[in-house]
Image: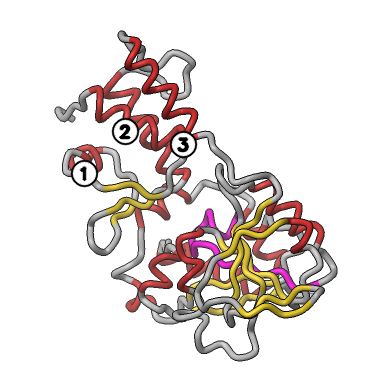
Amino acid sequence: MTEQINLQQSRVLESIVLQQKDKVLFKKWMQPIRDAYPFGQLTFDDKYLLLTEADYEVIAELLKDLRGYDVHSAQQLPSNTRMEVAKRINNEKSGGAKAGNDWILISTLSGQLKLKDGDYRLPLNSVLVMDLQQLKEHQHHTILIVENKAVLPHLSSSIFNDIENYDPLIIYRGDPYFSVATANEFILSQQGQCQIHTFFDSDPKGLSMALAVPSISGMWLVDLANISVLKNVNQEITFQQQSSVDYSIAQKCENFGAELARYYQRMNQYRIAIMQEHAVARNLDIILHSKSS
């Protein structure tokens, strides 16, 4: 590859890896680099790139090739002026801000939040920050864990719209801002009290993450019955990047149930990787795969 990147561009890529950004503005200078090092998925309007952990690894590798340094090393891009140093420290300080270790991002499909002291009517498609302890005694029969917070406000008006008698408490799984540990603590506190479902990307990594959720009883996945419908949104490159994410995933699917094992076989056969954003945007059919008793 003859394309190179300048210092400013390398810092943009570096920040993507270090801050694990899942969505960034797509710049023209990124195109030739992506041709040589495939990373990220363009949104439908070609304005943004959606990124996964596999993409961070690709970006880190290209920085090694094109700039000659390890993005994870202690000494990366030395600054030569006090203003540069101050700017970088300020960026790192703001990037490290947290929502709070006791806060969880939630939503509901009906706009009804059912707590121990009563039901609360919420604006439709709203997303709330809730205190962990207050939420532990909710009165919903099902918890739905969602992988990406960007889809939270859109679930009730899209793929879950026609599912009758389904009104789970929806929680975001967490990220560097909303603590993953806090979300996991909440899930662990709910074991045996309600059904625990997931809605993650329909790809190998999404399956692996869902199967790692404690006491999971079901997972919503894109229906693979009609593969031709999915060809415009399927990310085969993502599937290729994730194909070795979990070598035991086939056995885990088998342990979950024969239905999910068949789903994973079909996913492998057609190299399927459907992001949940695409499932919501295209209003794709989804199926609940329940764990065998």
Q: CA distance from mark 1 to mark 3?
A: 18 Å
Q: Position of residue 95 (x, y in %)?
A: 47, 35
Reply above or below: 208 against 288: above
Q: Earlier in the sequence, mark 3 or mark 2?
A: 2
Q: Is residue 44 left or right of residue 210?
A: left
Which quadrant is the N terminus positioned in? top left
Q: Which residue is mark 1?
A: 27
Q: Is residue 278 above or below residue 74?
A: below
> Whole-Å distance between the Cαs marked 1 and 2?
10 Å
- Judging by the rendered image, the residue that carries numbered circle 3 is 19
Q: Secondary structure at mark 1?
A: loop
Q: Residues within 10 Å of mark 1 (few under 14, many from 20)?
A: few
Residue corresponding to mark 2: 12
Q: Are marks 1 and 3 in contact (CB under 8 Å)?
A: no
Q: Mark 1 and mark 2 in contact? Answer it, CB < 8 Å.
A: yes
Near-viewer residue (72 or 96): 96
Residue 29, relative to residue 123: is it above or below? Answer: above
Q: Earlier in the sequence, mark 1 or mark 3?
A: 3
